[in-house]
Amino acid sequence: MKRRLLLLLVFALLLLTGGVALTLWRSYGDPRSTPFLQWARGNNATREALIVTEREACPGAPFILPADGFIGLLYGDPRGPYSASSPHQGIDIFSNDAPGRVPVYAAYDGYVTRESNWKSSLIIRVPDDPLQPGREIWLYYTHMADQDGNDFIVDALPAGTHEQFVQQGTLLGYTGDYNGNSPRTIWVHLHFSIVLGNGRGGYLNELEFANTIDPSPYLMRPVSYACAPRPTTCTPDPGCPAGAGS
């Protein structure tokens, strides 16, 4: 009876602490998880050492990193709350600060849409993919609100915005910890992904991994789970199997 009660308490704790606890639970056996565990267990100095603070693009990269922070969950990442059958569709850039404090920028020139029901998200249409000319891609940003859904997106981009042009480096808002109606709490971060167009002037469902592209060659950083474990480093060749043509 006591054992069953203990298991129920552990399960309840996982539900209450949400994605953070589940991520840690699944991370211990993964050799790529050392920096993530350092972030989770570290003090302020340890966290600061993991943060990327470069506002200029890496040499040869068309995109700038959209926010300063620790790139903790990678593209194609199977670690919790994701899985091998449903991997992470983008990258998560974690902030070592409170919600609404760390700026988020346009990674590339494009046209912003913010759907009328989006509390923490926006998407930027890039008419001409810089790595595959002639292809339209979309840059998706989310978690830019507090836990109650109060957004940190700039006033110039209210809900209902459609095709508002922004230049690379334009301030879009600030990182947050909004997670919709999910019972899982999350750390303050920006989720950023590259989404394929649907061929009709719109975008595909970002929640489906097959509809997204590896950001590594666009950032010239190995931010794919399949390649290198140090996404903080600019590199002339990210060496990612998914690559720009995926």
Image (tube, rainbow, N blue to C red):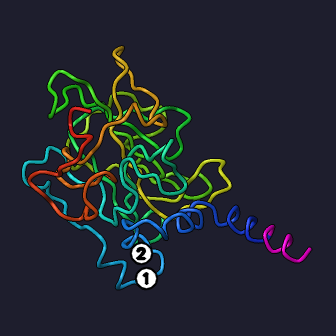
Secondary structure found at label 2: helix
Q: Residues within 10 Å of mark 1 (few under 14, many from 20)?
A: few
Q: Which residue is mark 2?
A: 39
Residue 31: x %, y % from top left: 38, 68
Q: Is 203 or 101 nearer to us in this picture?
A: 203
> What residue appears at the point 66 percent right and 48 percent down from the top-left corner?
181
Could you tell me if the residues under marks 1 and 2 are in contact, i.e. CB atoms within 8 Å?
yes
Left or right: 238 in relation to 160: left
- Residue 7 within the segment the image draws in magenta: yes
Q: Is 236 or 67 nearer to us in this picture?
A: 236
Residue 196 — which label?
A: none
- As drawn, which residue projects farthest toward the top? 200
Residue 119: x %, y % from top left: 54, 44
> What residue appears at the point 37 percent right and 78 percent down from the top-left corner?
47
Secondary structure found at label 1: loop
Residue 33: x %, y % from top left: 40, 68
> What residue appears at the point 31 percent right and 37 percent down from the top-left corner?
213
Q: Is residue 206 above or below residue 45?
A: above
Left or right: 134 in relation to 171: left
Left or right: 36 in relation to 133: right
Quadrant into which the C terminus falls: top left
The magenta-colored residue range is 1-8
- Residue 189 within the segment the image draws in magenta: no
Q: Quadrant of residue 164?
A: top left
Kind of residue sitting beneath label 1: Gly
Q: Is residue 106 above or below residue 27?
A: above
Residue 105: x %, y % from top left: 29, 51
Kind of residue sitting beneath label 2: Trp
Q: Quadrant of residue 206?
A: top left
Question: Whole-Å distance between the Cαs marked 1 and 2?
Answer: 5 Å
Residue 42 — which label?
A: 1
